[in-house]
Image (tube, rainbow, N blue to C red):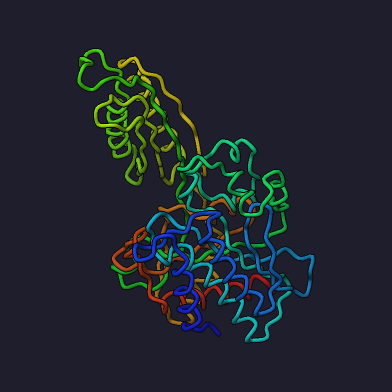
Amino acid sequence: MIKVERIRKDLETLAQFTATPGAGVTRMAFSPEERQAREYLQREMEAIGLEVYTDAVGNLFGRRAGKDPEAPVVMIGSHIDSVKNGGPFDGAAGVVAALEIARALQDMGKETVHPIEVVVMTEEEGGRFGSGLFGSRAMVDGISQEELTGTFDEERISKAEAMKAFGLDPDKVREAVRKPGSVKAFLELHIEQGPVLESTGTKIGIVESIVGIRTFFVTIYGSADHAGTTPMNMRRDALVAASRVITAIDGIAREAGENTVGTVGSIQVKPGSNNVVPAEVRFSIDLRDGDNEVIERATAKIKQVLAEVCEAANLTYTWEEALSVPPVATEAKIIDIVAEAAQRKNISFRMMPSGAGHDAMVMARLAPVGLLFVPSRDGKSHCPEEWTDYEDIALGAELYLDAVLALAQ
């Protein structure tokens, strides 16, 4: 059955693969640290007899054969890439839970009709290139060459170049697309990344819906001039304009709807000198809501403000959409299976929405999905203080073990 000590060992090992020792987990997509983590997971998969393979975009799979090799697979997993200076549980908890479920099935000697695949998704966070959910989008919709060659990290390395350096062929990304009907269900366990479960003393959150997400990048162009000799009324200051737009975004999000959130999380200023008027500013916009129409209305208002601010200041701008994922509902049958298992095992649970994006929201276009949350201490995530008790992850894995067996028979 599910063993907490194996979960602890896996997570403590994965936490060592970071570019920022002592300052949280920094494990970017296609990085040496991600390679180390993948190699560890591959060894653990092979140790229990899983058939390990990597698809065209770098998603890592461990396949457990079913009695019917042609039957659609039951897939379970999450991601191991992180944000900068993140925590050891975001994504990794779901991957380790999936691996532990495969171990438990091996220990029990259980056979299933459907094959089961443990999946380690690549570039879910978007921490390196700005557009996340890469691995799941590659499986469901396919990735365009424009995205591969037109998105860059801070060192101006394109996604295509990073893939090549990682041993992948960006010309073959379409091979990662899964055929309709090839996946029976996708299950993901994740830390809540919020305070609800802990504050209510609840062990499990069964997610009923996942918010829609739109991510944009705006670049405003002005003129680099001397900070001491250029009169205020003659300046074309890109940063002043950006600040006005960013302030407006906060107000638009607050007024759009009760559950709407808007965030500007990254900003770059050029030339970035204290004595030069900023000539170029690039910033991100992250909009989320459970209603796609609300997101659309907020987006339109932001575009209007951007146009008005830039016109008034004699500036130009570009607007790029990096990610667009609509809100989704999880599968009622999977919810019922997990809820019944929790009641049977006397594990406390509650139904809840997800305000964070997860691979499950993309996979919902390919197969029925389930999403489980386990408590986050103080609601913290995306920071070194992120913590979830190993015992809580084990409880979630127990429930998903039941779900996997029910779905794979």
Is there any visible trace of residue 296 in the rendered image? Answer: yes
Is 117 placed left or right of 400 in the picture?
A: right
The image quadrant where one finds the N terminus is bottom right
Q: Position of residue 388 (x, y in %)?
A: 38, 71
Q: Residue at x 22, y 13 (%)?
A: 233
Q: Residue 259 in the image: state x and y as whole percent.
A: 35, 46
Query: Is residue 343 in view from this perspective?
Result: no
Quarter location, residue 266? top left
Residue drawn at (48%, 52%), measured in percent from left and top? 125
- Tell me where residue 126 appears, x and y as whole percent: 48, 49
Q: Which residue is depicted at the point 63% across and 74% down?
A: 45
Percent position of residue 241, x then y:
30, 25
Please say if 133 is above or below 204. above
Quadrant occupied by the C terminus: bottom right
Residue 60 placement, left or right of 389: right
Seen from the viewer's position, the closer of residues 105 and 171 is 171
What residue is shown at x 60% (from left), y 80% (from top)?
103
Q: Is residue 338 above or below residue 151?
A: below
In this rendering, position of residue 101 left or right of residue 253:
right
Quarter holding residue 67: bottom right
Q: Nearer the viewer, residue 254 or 79?
A: 79
Which one is in front, 332 or 29? 29
> How many numbered marks, from 0 up?
0
Image: 233 above or below 60: above
